[in-house]
Amino acid sequence: MTRAAPAGLAILLVVAVWGVMHVGWYAHGQITDYGEYQMYGDNIVHYDRVPYKDFRVEYPPAALPAFVVPSLLERYDYRRVFQALMFLCDVGLVLGVGVIAGRRAAALAALASLALGSVLLSRFDLWPAALAVLAVAALVRNRLAVSALLLGTAFAAKLWPAVLVPVVLIWLVRTDGARRAAAWTAGAVAAAAAWFIPFAVLSPGGVGHSFHVQLARPLQLESLGSSILLAVHQAAGTTIHLTSSYGSQNVTGPGAHAAAIVTSIAEVLALALVVVLFARGPVTNGRFVTYLAASIVAVVAFGKVFSPQYMIWLIPFVLLVPGVGGVLASILLFASLVLTQLWFPSHYWDLAAFAQLQTWELVVRDLSVVALLVVIVWAGLQHEMLGEHRSRLEALQRVRAQVE
């Protein structure tokens, strides 16, 4: 079988999955962001307005191509063109997973879309996710310049790929040396700067507003902190309120601010733990992709914002985790995806009304993602112990050879 054959089969599987996602319950009751995206694209294409300067944009500059291309192809329906772009991103994501972890992981990455549901069709998160996993694929293939370009662009599309950088730098320093790590860093920074600097020069306040919107949001309804408050509300009748701001539904009331602070601290500590654990052990490809996955899961699990589309970020990286820990992580990932689809989009407004069933579905989903982080960290520790065992065995074999 040629190398092209597995790639062709993966693409056919993505085509089949996307076909299924346009029928049945997937096609009903969608909650979409097409209107916002089209507003951005039309402002640029049809009204010659400069983003960030002439109108506010919530997302970083490398997100703009996903909004502009459907507006450029105005003879076609905006939604169809946008979905075609996301289909191509999904293909890139699945192929990137296949390059790193093989055909089985690629097939699971394609099928994961069915578990999560229609949110993939109407959010641009497949774009940064595909860029990020392809950056890792280029890295393990020793294509440092390509990797830097892709990851810098991924960061310029939606910020979160920055959490991959500490583990990547440790891996590069330990495998290729500090000079190559510095060159990769310079390339990634240059790629991101190429997207940001033109708009920052034209409107530093507009670009600053984009960062503010991304980083200063309150405790969102679907976050771990919110789900705990909702569970307490269901069990003890405590006071909790829903407010709409920053384009999402958020919770307020006693304990909301404290929950946001505590989960944010937990997020930072979890990320620090992931970096320390990776740095102290042997550098192998298995540990590398495992701790990359742990970094992203930590951000999603403990972030004060946890929109349904954030689950897209987890798909390509969790499926890279090898071994028994990877199998358990994949099971938890698919469970978390299905648990998300149970209430989004068809019962989202029931959740926003603090309905009991949807509240507990959310609680279980959020705790499943926390459990996913625990399993992935455990998998990393197992790889570390296995590496130490192999090192001792090799040392013993060398001693025996010398004696003989």
Image (cartoon, rainbow, N blue to C red):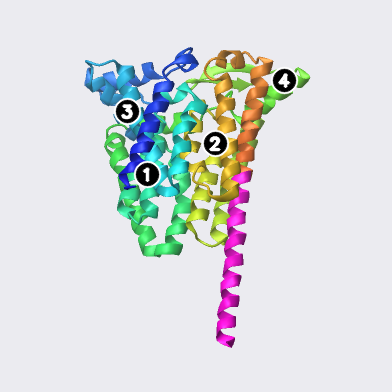
Residue 255 in view, yes or no: no
Query: Which residue type does callout 3 highlight?
Result: Leu
Q: For the stretch drawn in magenta, what is the main secondary structure?
A: helix
Q: Is residue 91 magenta?
A: no
Residue 85 is marked as 3
185 left or right of 339?
left
The answer to whether residue 113 is above or below residue 186 is above
Q: Residues within 10 Å of mark 3 (few under 14, many from 20)?
A: many
Q: Going from the N terminus, do you reach mark 1 or mark 4 first?
A: 1
Magenta-drawn segment = 375-404
Label 3, label 1: how far apart the Cα atoms are: 16 Å
**Residue highlighted by disc 4:** 233
Q: Nearer the viewer, mark 3 or mark 4?
A: 3
Label 3, label 4: how far apart the Cα atoms are: 41 Å
Q: Are marks 1 and 2 in contact (CB under 8 Å)?
A: no
Residue at 64% in and 19% down: 358
Q: Going from the N terminus, do you reach mark 3 or mark 1 first?
A: 3
Residue at 63% in and 25% down: 362
Of all residues shown, which one is farthest toward the bottom?
403
Q: Going from the N terminus, do you reach mark 1 or mark 2 first?
A: 1
Q: Residues within 10 Å of mark 1 (few under 14, many from 20)?
A: many
Q: Nearer the viewer, mark 1 or mark 4?
A: 1
Label 1, label 4: how far apart the Cα atoms are: 43 Å
